[in-house]
């Protein structure tokens, strides 16, 4: 990874806004490290990190020009092609989507296959993303769907409960309640979606490719620095999200590394954000098989490999 950019005065920096996919947390550590350590400035960027959340429409804000970059996910990018929305993924920070199925220990729910026919609490977003894939590949049915309360509460009191979780936080919250549970990471069962993608617009790529390149390279450097020392980034995360706990930051930081969330697949040798055409194609074909996306889609419009490849090929 090249890191030859030089420091610039404030007047020479290009203002850029990036919208995250949730409240500030360790899962966005690379962005916050790049901000905290002045890496963005070294690449000529004055970056504002804007928090996402449950009521924030990232695609709308990005395409509407309210932000320049946004964290998204692979299915969203492919769906944008179908809807003729000019959204493009230029890096994928998460090689494994952290989505999980949370199950209690000792009740026989030790694999995804074992969940067939059992009630599962799945939110609306999951019902249009991984759920059709689970039906297609594992024989699940819509009769298994149960309401999702966006809390671990119902899971804690029901030893037979199964719910969607997030592998980087599940164990932290359940251990506080002395609940013995495990997270079945969907990525380990074939769910091949890129997650925490760095998205921008076709217009930005065409008009300002140098800004896109700088943003991709600086953020990749930020991720490397975050896993070298998370403290500068964590301080900024807590400024943006005062409710964030040090213990949760530490837990998520460790789990991302243990599960290979960022450094696996094409990124396993420290190539943060790397994507491949082959994996995009494989995932698209999975979504066609699941009935989520149509055949004949110009799926290559969903991404641009040139920026992230340039980070590691010079």
Image (tube, rainbow, N blue to C red):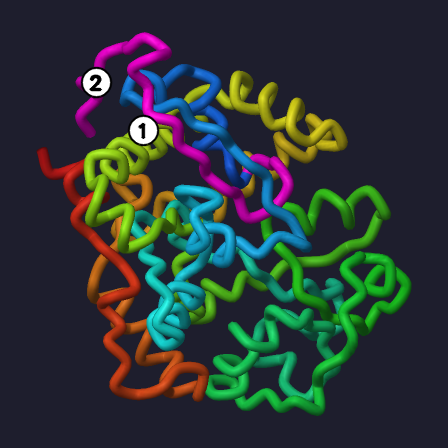
Secondary structure predominantly adopted by residues drawn in magenta: loop
- The numbered mark at residue 44 is none
Question: Which corner quadrant of the image does residue 16 belong to?
Answer: top left
Mark 1 vs mark 2, CA separation in Å:
9 Å
User: Which residue is found at the position 40% from the left and 42% from the top?
Assistant: 68
Within the magenta stretch, is there residue 18?
yes
Any magenta on residue 120? no
Q: Residue at x 73, y 63 (%)?
A: 105
Whether residue 119 is visible here, answered yes or no, is yes
The N terminus lies in which quarter of the figure?
top left
Residue 58: horizontal and vertical position, in percent? 52, 53
Residue that carries the numbered disc 2 in the rendered image:
5
Relative image position of residue 47 (x, y in whole percent): 43, 27
Say whether disc 1 or disc 2 marks the residue closer to the N-terminus. Answer: 2
**Which segment did they paint magenta?**
1-26
Give the residue displayed 21% in from the left and 18% down from the top. Answer: 5
- Regarding residue 260, the answer to whether it shows in the image is no
Residue position marked by numbered label 1 in the rendering:
218
**6 horizontally vs 29: left or right:** left
- Are dots 1 and 2 in contact, CB under 8 Å? yes
Expressed as whole percent of the image width and height from the top left, the position of residue 213 reads 23, 37
Percent from the top left, x then y, of residue 70?
45, 47
In this rendering, is residue 278 above or below 230? Answer: below
Viewer-proximal residue among 189 and 63: 63
Q: Nearer the viewer, residue 79 or 170?
A: 79
Circle 1 packing at 10 Å, graded few (<14), some (14-19), many (20+), is many
Q: Secondary structure at mark 1?
A: helix
């Amino acid at each position: 990874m090249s890191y030859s950019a030089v420091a610039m005065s404030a007047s020479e920096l290009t203002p850029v806004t990036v919208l995250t996919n949730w409240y500030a947390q360790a899962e966005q550590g690379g962005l916050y490290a790049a901000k905290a350590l002045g890496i963005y400035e070294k690449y000529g960027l004055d970056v504002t990190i804007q928090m996402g959340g449950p009521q924030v429409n990232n695609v709308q804000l990005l395409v509407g020009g309210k932000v320049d970059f946004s964290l998204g996910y692979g299915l969203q990018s492919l769906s944008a092609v179908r809807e003729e929305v000019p959204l493009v993924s230029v890096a994928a920070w998460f090689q494994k989507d952290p989505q999980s199925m949370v199950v209690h220990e000792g009740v026989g729910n030790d694999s995804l296959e074992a969940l067939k026919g059992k009630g599962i609490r799945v939110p609306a977003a999951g019902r249009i993303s991984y759920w059709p894939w689970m039906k297609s590949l594992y024989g699940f049915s819509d009769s298994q769907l149960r309401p999702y309360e966006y809390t671990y509460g119902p899971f804690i009191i029901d030893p037979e409960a199964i719910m969607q979780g997030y592998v980087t936080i599940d164990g932290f919250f359940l251990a506080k309640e002395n609940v013995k549970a495990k997270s079945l990471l969907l990525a380990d069962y074939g769910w091949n979606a890129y997650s925490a993608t760095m998205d921008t617009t076709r217009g930005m790529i065409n008009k300002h490719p140098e800004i896109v390149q700088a943003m991709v390279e600086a953020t990749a450097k930020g991720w490397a620095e975050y896993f070298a020392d998370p403290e500068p980034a964590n301080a900024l995360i807590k400024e943006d999200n005062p409710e964030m706990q040090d213990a949760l930051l530490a837990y998520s930081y460790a789990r991302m590394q243990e599960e290979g969330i960022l450094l696996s697949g094409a990124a396993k040798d420290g190539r943060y954000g790397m994507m491949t055409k082959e994996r995009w194609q494989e995932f698209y074909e999975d979504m066609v098989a699941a009935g989520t996306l149509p055949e004949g889609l110009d799926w290559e419009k969903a991404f641009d490999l040139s920026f992230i490849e340039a980070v590691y090929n010079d």
